């Protein structure tokens, strides 16, 4: 009996790799294309929809035939985004805007009820708004405790309030909640990133484009994913490594900080 030569084994390996690659591509793209059609007619409430990722999410959902209600504080900007959504909608549908400040927690119920009334129900609640705050070393003597209260109310408590008010409607429709977060806000390398200063770190971890991020979020929604890390390579390995070996990640970030300073 003769053994297959190295070139034969290599060739079999290459053919198997190509077949697996094609199957993976078919699974990834085929599935998404079919599922994107499932967004048609979905009733979507997007917070923080006047700019950035929220605005781009509105365009994505509108393009795929969803009905969107946009909320943020700036009414005029929201109206422009809403008009753009209508132009992108396959049926030229009219979308809705609700100008509201999420710091006013007692108004969150109104936002959800009004959105559901205008769209005839709710299938998706996208929690995305944020009061931005620079990531910098903590200076106790300068720290503004009133700002802390606003940050907690807008970036955390309003999310819980909106969720509470939307849940009965989402249970009726079998809908979902999507929460957008930042890896800068997670445990990952928080100490190191804060110590090194945002600008230096951003040179290494460039923020993804809002449009690309929105596209990835919509794909994750239609594919029923529970979690999405985007861009995966820049975010996930560091978070995973930090959970098992925090010292190494902190050392790495400190090394970057020293190198850049
Ligand atoms: N951009 C990134 O690189 C990045 C990276 C990772 C994660 N994220 C996450 O993605 C989400 C969106 O970020 P982004 O960069 O797209 O934000 P952004 O462009 O700064 O937009 C923030 C949105 O929140 C709204 N907003 C701010 N304060 C508000 C308030 N008090 N009440 C109601 N709405 C308010 C703003 O609208 P008004 O000013 O009109 O109210 C705006 O529509 C955040 O959760 C962020 O953590 C972003």
Image: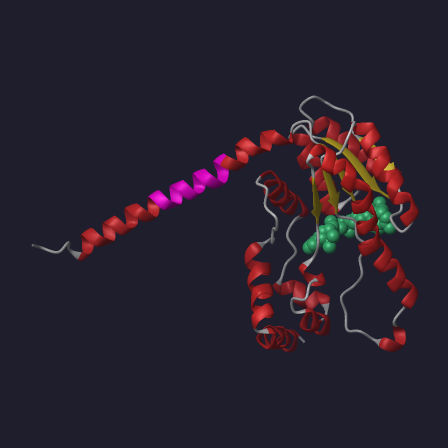
Q: Is residue 55 left or right of residue 246?
A: right
- Which of the 4 quarters of the picture holds residue 177? top right
- Which of the 4 quarters of the picture holds residue 144? bottom right
Report x, y in % for residue 4: 15, 54
Identify which residue is drawn at 24% across, 53% down. Answer: 10
Is 26 one of the magenta-colored residues?
yes
Q: Is residue 251 left or right of residue 136?
A: left
Q: Is residue 234 above or below residue 117?
A: below
Report x, y in % for residue 186: 69, 63
> Considering the image in quadrants, where does the N terminus appear?
bottom left
Report x, y in % for residue 253: 62, 73
- Which of the 4 quarters of the picture holds residue 100? top right
Task: Decide if residue 74 is in sight here.
Answer: no
Magenta range:
19-30
Per the picture, the main secondary structure of the magenta-coloured stretch is helix
Q: Is residue 186 left or right of residue 134?
A: left
Task: Decide if residue 163 is in sight here.
Answer: yes
Q: Spot the residue most to the top.
A: 91
Identify which residue is drawn at 30% across, 47% down. Answer: 16
Q: Spot the residue most to the left.
A: 1
Report x, y in % for residue 131: 82, 55
Is 57 one of the magenta-colored residues?
no
> Considering the image in quadrants, where does the C terminus appear?
bottom right
Asked whether 235 or 45 is in front, the reply is 45
């Amino acid at each position: 009996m003769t053994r297959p030569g190295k070139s034969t084994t290599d060739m079999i390996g290459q053919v198997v790799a190509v077949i697996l690659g094609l199957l993976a591509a078919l699974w990834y793209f085929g599935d998404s294309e079919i599922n994107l059609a499932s967004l048609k007619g979905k009733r979507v409430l997007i917070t923080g929809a006047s700019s950035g990722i929220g605005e781009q999410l509105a365009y994505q959902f509108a393009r795929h035939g969803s009905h969107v209600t946009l909320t943020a504080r700036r009414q005029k900007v929201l109206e422009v985004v809403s008009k753009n959504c209508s132009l992108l909608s396959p049926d030229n549908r009219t979308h809705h805007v609700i100008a509201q400040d999420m710091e006013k927690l007692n108004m969150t119920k109104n936002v959800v009820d009004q959105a559901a009334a205008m769209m005839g129900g709710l299938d998706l609640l996208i929690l995305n708004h944020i009061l931005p705050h620079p990531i910098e070393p903590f200076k106790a003597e300068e720290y503004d405790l009133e700002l802390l209260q606003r940050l907690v109310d807008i970036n955390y408590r309003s999310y819980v309030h909106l969720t509470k008010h939307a849940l009965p409607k989402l249970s009726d429709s079998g809908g979902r909640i999507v929460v957008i977060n930042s890896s800068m806000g997670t445990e990952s390398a928080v100490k190191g990133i804060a110590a090194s200063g945002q600008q230096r770190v951003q040179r290494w971890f460039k923020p993804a484009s809002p449009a690309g991020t929105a596209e990835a979020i919509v794909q994750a929604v239609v594919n029923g994913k529970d979690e999405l890390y985007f861009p995966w390579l820049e975010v996930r390995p560091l978070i995973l490594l930090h959970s098992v070996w925090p010292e190494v990640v902190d050392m790495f970030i400190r090394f970057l900080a020293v190198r850049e300073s």
